[in-house]
Image: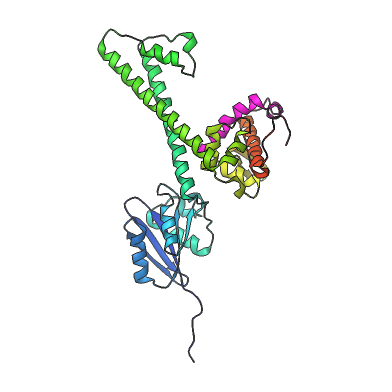
Amino acid sequence: MKTKDTTDSKLFIGIDVHKRSWKIHTATDLFDGSDLTIPPNGFALKKYIDRHYKGYQVHCVYEAGCCGFSHHRLFESFGWTSLVINPADICRSGKLQFQKTDKIDARLLCVELKLGRLRCICIPSIEREQLRCLFRRRNDLVKQMRKIKTQLLMQLLYLGIEIPKEYDNPNWSHDFRNWIRGLEFEYITMNSCLRSRMSSFDFVDHQIRSVSKELRAYCRKHYKKDYYLLKSVPGVGGIVACGILSEIGNLRRFKNFKQLASYVGFIPSMRQSGDTLITAGVTPRANHLTRSYLVEATWVALRKDPVIQEYYRTHQGKDVKRILIKVARKLLSRIHAVIRTETPYQIGVVS
């Protein structure tokens, strides 16, 4: 009597992804495999699998990072099960805290995948991912503009030029810019230096305005309902709304507010030993860009919403930074409620 194997053989692959090469570790459901270095593309990996593990159910995993999600989409097009994970989710023993190589990382990924202890992060659609790229481009431009402004002010300070009091503030009006352009120096070299700096300023300023306009126009067209729901919340302007839509995506995917607060990073970092509990600020595991924009939006909300103001006053006397994080978390809960209920926010109404 012939026996027939009714189980499907499984292959688990841990991939340490880099620009120039990939280090992989393979293992089947019965045996441990081997380590291998391959060229940095999915087709090279598929060629190796088809040659040595044809007919296996393939499960692969790699860490989220600079390589994005294109490899994940390619693996799924092969019919494989693919996971992209947060590097912080890898369980490391005490010994491996002090040993880190590509080979060790690939092996750890493979072992954790085989044991079923890994959870895939949320993979954005290609459309959402490219919207996120545009939003991050704007953020890079804002950083560049801040640097140019600082260099210009330091140049004036170095030359002993005093800025008029009506212009000495963070907001650079057109009059202030024209005042800088109108400065004349004894030698042409300094005039050329200043023109060059202002030329950089004008270019980046134009880029910021152009990208911001495109962001708002795109979100108004493709996410009109959520865009205007978000803008109804005090402190959330067009750019912050675009940031939430691009960085977080669909807020309805979170089962409750705690999951959203954890994703953004509005949860405490705690350490407890016996009766001693130490809180060390907010967790470092966060979507830092979204968190920073929400903190900035909180300052505007404090000026516009009396309920937010009252909540802030109940914590007065404590550390200002801690209070601001509490208020920002409150603002995030209101944003979540507005999207979940699909009801525009009403200023002054307690939720």
Query: Is there any visible trace of residue 334 in the rendered image?
Result: yes
Residue 134, how many percent across, how many down? 44, 39
Q: What kind of secondary structure does the magenta stretch mostly adopt?
A: helix
Q: Is residue 303 magenta?
A: yes
Which residue is the extreme one toward the left? Answer: 188
Residue 250 vs 199, above or below: the answer is below
Where is residue 14, by image quadrant?
bottom left
Which residue is the extreme one toward the right? Answer: 350
Which residue is the extreme one toward the bottom? Answer: 1
User: Which residue occupies the foreground of this view, 74 or 38?
Assistant: 74
Residue at screen point 66% across, 47% down: 256
Residue 89, how many percent across, how many down? 52, 52
Residue 46, how many percent across, how many down? 37, 64
Left or right for 113, reference 304 = left
Query: Is there any visible trace of residue 287 in the rendered image?
Result: no
What is the count of numbered marks?
Answer: 0
Residue at screen point 39% across, 27% down: 204
Q: Is residue 192 magenta?
A: no
| Image: magenta residue range | 288-317
Where is residue 342, by image quadrant?
top right
Residue 118, how many percent across, how many down? 52, 58
